[in-house]
Amino acid sequence: MPDNLPSLSSAIRDALLTGDPRAKAMATRKLVRDWRLGRLAFVFDCDMPDEPARPDRPELLPPNQMPKRRKGGSERGRIALWHAVAHIEFVAIDLALDMAGRFGESMGEAFVDDFLSVAADEAMHFALIDRKLHAMGSHYGALPAHAGLWQAAQDTRHDVAARLAVVPMVLEARGLDVTPAMLERVRSQGDENGARILERILDDEIRHVRFGTKHFDELCRARDENPQESWRNLVERHFGGRLKPPFNDSAREAAGLSREYRTGIV
């Protein structure tokens, strides 16, 4: 490997500090491609930022100040739904990049491979939804968005086990639970393009949760800890609430997240 290759950590940091949404998605896909092609050195010579760069819009609001989305099938309601999904996918790019950049040196190359793959998926998801919003006459940033999604990264920035427990194994797993109903709703509105996007996201999210569960289990076993018990303790400490149904048990099982994990915290 040439000595003058850019470091992986600097490329990840640059992507995290790219604020423009489309540019961040493209930077992420480029860095993942460069990593896979051997153009980046497995070197961690810079710290990850405490906060990734954000665009001026959307306006970020606390959860209790977010406007309620109507359940009807109006165009305005459909745009609000897709805007919310776009924001989740946009923040998910940063969550996956930060996972690889913050913990990759200690966790190893297989861990980096997995979470850079997640970052590339999230960037692709965002690009698909951004394109859909434009086709609907809107754009990402046109509506307010949830300010709390990055908080999970802040709360777990010093502990890879806590990060794995909360981000892929709680937040992304929640996506497995709610996406089927959203898919059914979108399909009932005759939006087959939207249904295909959600099907792709659901398939990818199963793999993302599986990555989190796999690395969490391996970490717990290396520490001689029971994975289910450790997960429950970390969720109680860092997530701040009990898990609420519905649960998509078939998707969770496919992701390695069995019902035993939830014992006592549902």
Image: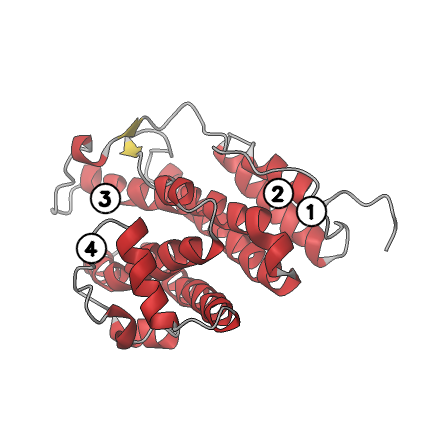
Mark linked to residue 12: 2
> Residue 196: horizontal and vertical position, in percent?
37, 61
Q: Which residue is mark 4?
A: 189
Q: Quadrant of residue 263?
A: bottom left
Can residue 192 be seen in this snapshot? no
How busy is the neighbourhood of tag 4: few (under 14 within 10 Å), some, or many (20 plus)? some
> Residue 168: horizontal and vertical position, in percent?
40, 58
Question: Could you say whether the residue bearing mark 3 is in a helix, strand or loop?
Answer: helix
Which comes before the other along the chain, label 3 or label 4?
Answer: 3
Q: Which residue is mark 1?
A: 8
Q: Are marks 3 and 4 in contact (CB under 8 Å)?
A: yes
Mark linked to residue 151: none
Name the foreground residue: 143 vs 245: 245
Q: Amino acid at mark 4?
A: Gln
The residue mark sitting in front, 2 or 3, is 2
Q: Which residue is mark 3?
A: 78
How busy is the neighbourhood of tag 3: few (under 14 within 10 Å), some, or many (20 plus)? some
> Residue 80: horizontal and vertical position, in percent?
24, 39
Could you tell me how far apart the alpha carbons at marks 3 and 4 are, in whole angstroms? 10 Å
Q: Amino acid at mark 3?
A: Arg
Q: Amino acid at mark 1?
A: Leu
How busy is the neighbourhood of tag 1: few (under 14 within 10 Å), some, or many (20 plus)? many
Q: Quadrant of residue 4?
A: top right
The residue mark sitting in front, 4 or 2, is 2
Name the foreground residue: 38 vs 58: 38
